[in-house]
């Protein structure tokens, strides 16, 4: 228990250090851009494909339930609201933790095990500004972009199932959706959610990597912890954020 | 500055992200339907607005011609004053009737406007004088119950006895 508090405290210290050294790492922007490529662009494949399938399955399920109430036209609304409000940010963040978070932890853990980080410090290069801060900002920038893509692709996938396959009316599908989905309360809140998840996920991955014991076993253990801690943090934060957003 | 393939990919990534957000806003969201262009404001007072909310549609003959701008409570008349933003292209006569209606049985509430016969049109800032309140289900049911109860009074003694009891309970 007391160990957890220690780790939480040093995690916060790492966060502060990242914020402080951000200016330095932004001056060499190509570092951040390189990391956006590795965390964001390379995660696109898994995010787009899973978004497509999530949308299709959701449309299928919703259609058969809503048909019992005689309102299959509402498929579009339920699909869009559940994807934009919940599934988009949450599933993206979970996949991101598995795809990019583990990579960050393993990379930094191995750098530490190979004493690359201490070598940098010896050369008066701050490893926080050179290695950690670009990865942090890359994660924070990539996450909302990926989540928005997930939502868009999910709705398209749901459309393909609902309209051509199941015979929901094309006009009703979109117009019901447009009547119910609010830009400010649904779409912007979804972006805010994914920003928060981006900060949490990347921070956990970075800290676990930084904190990993410098052995092969230690790095593998830290990678596992990244996935477990990020998933729990995402789901817990999602509840808090949703309850805040729905009451306001 | 040296150009790298990675930069191009990140550029594509960001553009796709912005495009997706734009697509969501336009295709799934209500950003387009909120834009009315030039509008003018009318007000209408109601004794009860039911579940009418800001941004609810204002319809005439079922077509959206404006939005509810804001809803205030007037402490002097004890009425709800609703401000409406109406598209400039549509003009309504002085004796226009505004009523709060419900889309379907359980749908959202909207404001219906029916134009009257007068030749003078409403101007910006004018007040719609003929209004009809929202239908409140509880009131409707209680009205129905009272009608049923009073129908029963003509029939026989037993029901006439039960009626004062029902009243005293209320």
Image: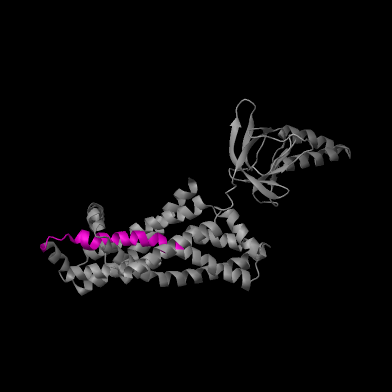
Q: Position of residue A154 (x, y in %)?
A: 51, 66
Q: Residue furthest front?
A: B1
> Which span of residues is magenta-colored?
A122-148
Q: Is A160 a magenta residue?
A: no
Nearer to the camera, A206 or B10 = B10
Would residue A121 be visible to someone looking at this image?
yes
- Tell me the quarter of the picture where residue A180 sits: bottom right
Left or right for B123, reference A138: right
Q: Main secondary structure of the magenta part?
A: helix
Q: Position of residue B113 (x, y in %)?
A: 71, 42
Q: Is A143 a magenta residue?
A: yes
Is B83 above or below relative to B13?
A: above
- Tell me the quarter of the picture where residue B86 sits: top right
Left or right for B76, reference A16: right
Q: Residue at x 59, y 58 (%)?
A: A177
Q: Position of residue A153 (x, y in %)?
A: 50, 67
Nearer to the camera, B119 or A78 = B119
- Tell me the quarter of the picture where residue B138 sits: top right
Q: Residue furthest top?
A: B76
Q: Quadrant of the N terminus of chain A?
A: bottom left
Would residue A60 be visible to someone looking at this image?
no
């Amino acid at each position: 228990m007391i160990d957890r508090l220690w780790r939480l405290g040093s995690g916060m210290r790492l966060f502060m250090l990242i914020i402080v050294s951000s200016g330095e790492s932004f001056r060499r922007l190509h570092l951040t851009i390189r990391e956006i490529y590795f965390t964001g662009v390379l995660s696109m494949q898994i995010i787009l494909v899973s978004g497509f399938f999530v949308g299709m399955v959701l449309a299928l399920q919703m259609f058969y339930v809503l048909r019992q109430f005689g309102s299959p036209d509402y498929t579009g609304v339920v699909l869009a609201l559940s994807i934009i409000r919940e599934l988009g940010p949450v599933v993206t963040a979970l996949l991101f933790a598995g795809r990019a978070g583990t990579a960050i932890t393993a990379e930094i853990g191995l750098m530490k095990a190979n004493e690359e980080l201490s070598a940098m410090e010896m050369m008066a290069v701050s490893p926080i500004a050179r290695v950690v801060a670009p990865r942090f900002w890359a994660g924070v920038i990539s996450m909302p972009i990926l989540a928005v893509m997930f939502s868009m692709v999910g709705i398209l996938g749901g459309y393909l199932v609902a309209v051509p396959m199941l015979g929901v009316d094309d006009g009703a599908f979109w117009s019901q959706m447009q009547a119910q989905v609010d830009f400010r309360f649904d779409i912007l809140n979804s972006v805010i959610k994914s920003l928060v998840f981006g900060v949490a996920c990347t921070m956990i991955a970075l800290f676990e990597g930084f904190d990993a014991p410098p052995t092969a076993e230690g790095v593998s253990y830290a990678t596992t912890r990244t996935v477990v801690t990020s998933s729990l943090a995402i789901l817990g934060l999602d509840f808090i954020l949703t309850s805040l957003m729905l009451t306001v | 500055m040296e150009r790298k393939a990675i930069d191009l990919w990140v550029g594509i990534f960001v553009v796709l992200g912005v495009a997706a957000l734009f697509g969501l806003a336009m295709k799934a969201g209500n950003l387009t339907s909120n834009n009315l262009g030039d509008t003018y404001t009318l007000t209408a007072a109601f004794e009860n607005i039911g579940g009418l909310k800001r941004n609810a549609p204002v319809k005439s003959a079922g077509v959206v011609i404006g939005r509810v701008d804001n809803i205030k409570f007037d402490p002097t008349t004890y009425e709800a004053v609703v401000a409406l933003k109406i598209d400039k292209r549509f003009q309504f006569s002085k004796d226009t009737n505004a009523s709060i209606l419900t889309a379907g049985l359980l749908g959202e509430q909207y404001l219906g406007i029916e134009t009257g016969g007068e030749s003078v049109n409403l101007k910006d800032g004018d007040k719609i004088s003929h209004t009809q309140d929202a239908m409140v289900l509880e009131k409707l049911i209680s009205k129905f119950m009272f009608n049923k109860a009073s129908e029963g009074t003509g029939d026989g003694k037993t029901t006439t006895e039960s009626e004062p009891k029902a009243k005293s309970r209320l």
